[in-house]
Amino acid sequence: MPKKLIEVALPLEAINRESAREKSIRHGHPSTLHLWWARRPLAAARAVLFASLVDDPSAHPERFRTPQAQEAERKRLFELIERLVKWENSTNPQVLSEARQEILNATGGNPPPVLDPFAGGGTIPLEAQRLGLEAHASDLNPVAVLINKALIEIPPRFAGQPPINPAYRQKARPSDRWPGAKGLAEDVRYYGQWMRDEAERRIGHLYPRAQLPSGSQATVIAWLWARTVRCPNPACGCQMPLVRSWVLSSKPGKEHHVEPQIDRSTQPPRVRYAIKRGKNAPEPPKTARGANFKCIACNQPVPGSYIKAEGVAGRMGAQMMAIVAEGNRERVYLPPTKEQEEKAQEANPKWYPEGQISDDRRSMFTPLYGLTHFHHLFTPRQLEALTTFSDLVAEAREKALQDAQAAGLGEQAKAYADAVAVYLGLGVSRLADIQNSLCMWESSKTQVRHLFTKQAIPMLWDYSEAGLFSKSAGDFIVSLGSLLRVLEAMPSSSLGKAYQQDATKINIEGKLPLISTDPPYYDNIGYADLSDFFYVWLRRSLGGVLPELFGTLLVPKAAELVATPYRFEGSKPKAQAFFEEGLGKAFERMREAAHPDYPLTVYYAFKQAESEEADGPDDEQAEAAEGRGNGGAEGTASTGWETMLTGLIRAGFQITGTWPMRSELSNRMVAKGANALASSIVLVCRPRPADAPVATRREFLQGLRAELPGALRELQQGSIAPVDLAQAAIGPGMAVYSRYAQVLESDGTPMRVRTALALINQMLDEVLSEQEGDFDPDTRWALAWFEQMGFEEGPFGMAETLSKAKNTSVQGLVEAGILWSRAGRVRLLRPEELPEGWNPAADPDIPVWEATHQLIRTLNTGGEKAAAALLAALPNGDAARELAYRLYAICERKKWAQEGLLYNALVTSWLEVSRLAQDVPKPEPTQEALL
């Protein structure tokens, strides 16, 4: 069968650049339809699907007879992919038409359908549809299935349909055109506005306006609350506030903060709150990691164990501490009033979700403090609001049904009304993400921040309750607006189908599919547990529309492929065995179901990056989250890779390609504080031939030595982040292992995947060590010293002995500008200690060490443009990147996290820095340099 482009070459730099840039795009991006965790970039999925369908030119020697002709054709395909992956071209009919035609040409006019058995947030099926392919999305999770229905199933069904709402029909003209799902979006907007207006009529009295100092009134944007517990000091007994920060606004020139005041005229003392302008916010009562606070009335330290016990006993309360109102083009900060506090208590919800939050304490932290059920995560006012909106979905659907019948839709009327209800229900579900008591007030942006900034439900102490009718974050129409921008831009170009199905039993009618998927990452994300938060509200609003999806009280969990020990009485081996068996069956079914002419592509990433959170959850909660398979424990990550690869290989697949796809911005905040995986590794797999040979351990090692160095060089040339290199190296290493029916140990037993992974890691270290031979003597000395001492001081004698072995001298290293030496002590200079204004053109002999650390200093102080100017002037720029890889490997082995960040940041910025450097004119060398 002909090789596909993805099995030979890809324009990886362009794909990664666009994938990283995509993370900063919000308006109209499909991810804003509804929250889902760990989505893959659209650009990467689009490129992977296209390259999986289109043949590599080498597969057609009759058409491309020479290597030059093949390379020219490959370049043409690359140029198309480079245009195809741009966000601006995701709705460009000319570019999409060109890509679709290329696919038709490659498939004889009969392209296969595309199936993702772990569809999740719908990236892969959506991009299949964008390429004109029939898209199938399968998932066990009903929330994921609903998202995929909204992305790929509903829009094509009603493409071109004009709005049916009476406001439009009164002014409709025969010449009106409603391409794609724009007409459906207009109806969702209309009925959503009706819901908002009706909700304000019913519960608007619970959201009073604020009285301004001028005597006028203003809409409330948010009420800020502090959770409280009774001070354990018998002489105090104050309801002590649990607050992380008193800051309301940190915007320059608009700084405001809360100032707590102790009223000792009462017994016990009562805390009241004033609002002050300026930067000098009081010290917060949170004193250390976890739930450790002090009482602001008596200064007694209060440990987390006491606060947990009070919460579990139901004695944790809440006190309003500030009101944020809409002023004249700025926020107005007001102290709480008796009227506002009383209105908040008037809410009396007649219904609330009874579901219990799961026992997974790696990501579900609120039960530790007594918030054990989902209704505990909302204030009474929020519960009444969300219940009201959920019930209004059904009422809006009835109105849409009547209007659709009046518009002449006939048998389609019910389906159309159901479609309108689906998006309205998703809008209410989105609203729950920002209308709960775990939403943070973001002082830098002066707005309410939604709950799910991490793949967890953390405990939050002081929280913000968003105004429901404020025309800002927390307003239903604002939330619905983001959803509508996505719906208006949907491809709606070909048929799509989303269904709830176990991945071990996948089946689609008709043609065999191309399968591309992003399977679960061992124990990394508990999708079912997390999505319960949304499910309880979707069930209320859409249970009558889609009873087959919402027939259970909570999301089904028993068959979910995730290695969660709490579901197996705390047994990690049982959890691992369940995951391994299930994933193996899923891969076996994929091999049976997939089209034989096209490769299987599998996305995999273990140190799964989490979104930025300005202040974060409690540190103890963050630590728990970081240690659960996103790289916190080396053994866990190895187990995850081993399990996935074992499933693939036992199912009869071999790896024929591996591509690191950038999936995170290199400059995001979390990357500055942690070595988070920035890439997903895309494995390209084919069924292993039935006559595949058996190899010995020696033959396997010989294959690694022959192929891994070249593969690593290609990865480094693509500027894969150093933190990703070990994961990316698994691909080419396992390509050697998986081409054999078995690899036999010296005693004749089959080599385990875990053993193969260990050998690949050893070979990776060897290759990186061998690259040191290309460095100058000063750099080799600095490397050896760094591995022993880092940037710490050491004895002169040891440095002198090492310098002789490396054919250099301590004095020469000092003169080279990389070493400090005084009074018998030496140390390497940190990047920030290097001189500013350094001119490489005036330096006749530049150690790679100096060039690398000057680049780091310049990047940190001047940004990518300044670093690009320096890179353009360096004669050994690529060597600096190689050194950064080697130094990162040392830092990771030594567990020097902060130092490792320096080198990881340099490499992840390299693509952009080198691109900018191409536009910098080369400086003329000075006379000194010439001499």
Image: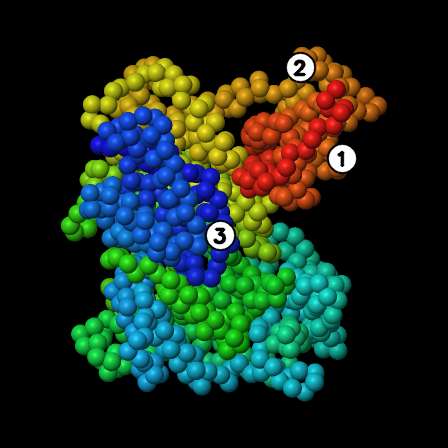
- 135 over 882 or under it: above or below: below
In the rendered view, tell whether residue 816 sits above or below residue 155.
above
Which label's residue is closer to the chain start, 2 or 1? 2
Q: Residue at (36%, 27%) from the top-left corner?
A: 68
Expressed as whole percent of the image width and height from the top left, the position of residue 127 reads 34, 51
- Quadrant in which residue 226 is drawn: bottom right
Q: Amino acid at mark 1?
A: Pro
Say which residue label 3 marks.
Answer: 23
Mark toward the start of the polypeptide (2 vs 3) = 3
Closest to the observer, 271 or 500: 500
Query: Disc 2 to disc 1, how far (Cα)?
Result: 25 Å
> Quadrant of the image for the N terminus?
top left
The residue indicated by pointer 2 is 806
Q: Alpha-carbon neighbours of circle 2 within 10 Å: few (<14), some, or many (≥20)?
A: some
Give, as a three-letter code, the residue at label 3.
Answer: Lys
- Choose mark 2 or mark 1, whichever is in front: 1
Q: Which residue is mark 1?
A: 835
Q: Earlier in the sequence, mark 1 or mark 3?
A: 3
Kindly state the secondary structure of the residue where label 1 is placed: loop
